[in-house]
Image: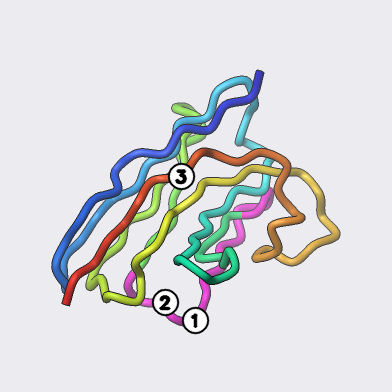
Amino acid sequence: QVQLVESGGGSVHAGGSLRLSCAVSGYSITRSHMGWFRQAPGKEREGVAAIDKDNNIRYTDSVKGRFTITKDNALNGLYLQMNSLKPEDTGMYYCAAGFWDSYPWNSPLKYAYWGQGTQVTVSS
C-alpha cells in the first residue's frame, strides 16, 4: 500500500521559514515524478515545485528564489524548504508522486499518489 505522509506545516509570521517533509512508503521515489502542491480556500490546487524522474526541478514563479525542493532517495523522502514566507503562501500543502510523462509538472493529473496534506499559515 502506497502512503505519503506530510509533516512540518505550522503557523508563522511573514518572513519566516518552514521545512515540509513527505515520508513515502510502499513506492520508490528514485525514478518517480515528485511534487508539492498547495490549495488555498476557494482556489484550485496549484503546483508549487517538482522534481521529475530525471531530477529536473521546476518551481512556480511566485516561489522562485524562496523555496527549495529536495529529495532523499535513501530515505525515500521529499522535502520543501520555504523561506521568506508571505501571507499568500498560506494553504494546505500536499506531496504527490507519479509516473506519467505526458502531463506538465504542475498538473495534478501527472501524479497518482497523494498525501493528506499539512497546513501552512502565514500571517502578516
Q: Nearer the viewer, residue 60 or 120?
A: 120
Q: Residue 121 location in percent, x, y? A: 27, 61
Which numbered mark, 2 or 3, is in the foreground of this view? Answer: 3
Compared to 96, does 123 lie above or below?
below
**Quarter the N terminus occupies:** top right
Which numbered mark, 1 or 3, is in the foreground of this view? Answer: 3
For mark 1, what is the residue?
61
For label 1, the SS is helix
- The quadrant holding residue 46 is bottom right
Q: Nearer the viewer, residue 92 or 19?
A: 92
**Quarter the C terminus occupies:** bottom left
Q: Amino acid at mark 2?
A: Lys
Compared to 56, does 66 lie above or below?
below
For label 2, the SS is loop
**Outermost residue to the front:** 42
Q: Amino acid at mark 1?
A: Asp
Give the mark, 2 or 3, whose residue is nearer the N terminus.
Answer: 2
- How far, Cα to Cα, is label 2 from label 1? 5 Å
Query: 10 Å neighbourhood of mark 1: few (<14), some, or many (≥20)?
Result: few
Kindly identify the residue that appears in the image at 59 percent across and 46 percent down. Answer: 96
Q: Residue 76 location in percent, x, y? A: 50, 30
For mark 3, what is the residue?
117
Q: Amino acid at mark 3?
A: Gly
Kindly identify the residue that appears in the image at 45 percent across and 66 percent down. Answer: 40
Q: Which residues are magenta?
A: 52-66
Which mark, by number, is residue 94? none
Q: Are marks 2 and 1 in contact (CB under 8 Å)?
A: yes
Prevailing SS of the magenta stretch:
loop
- How far, Cα to Cα, is label 1 from label 3? 22 Å
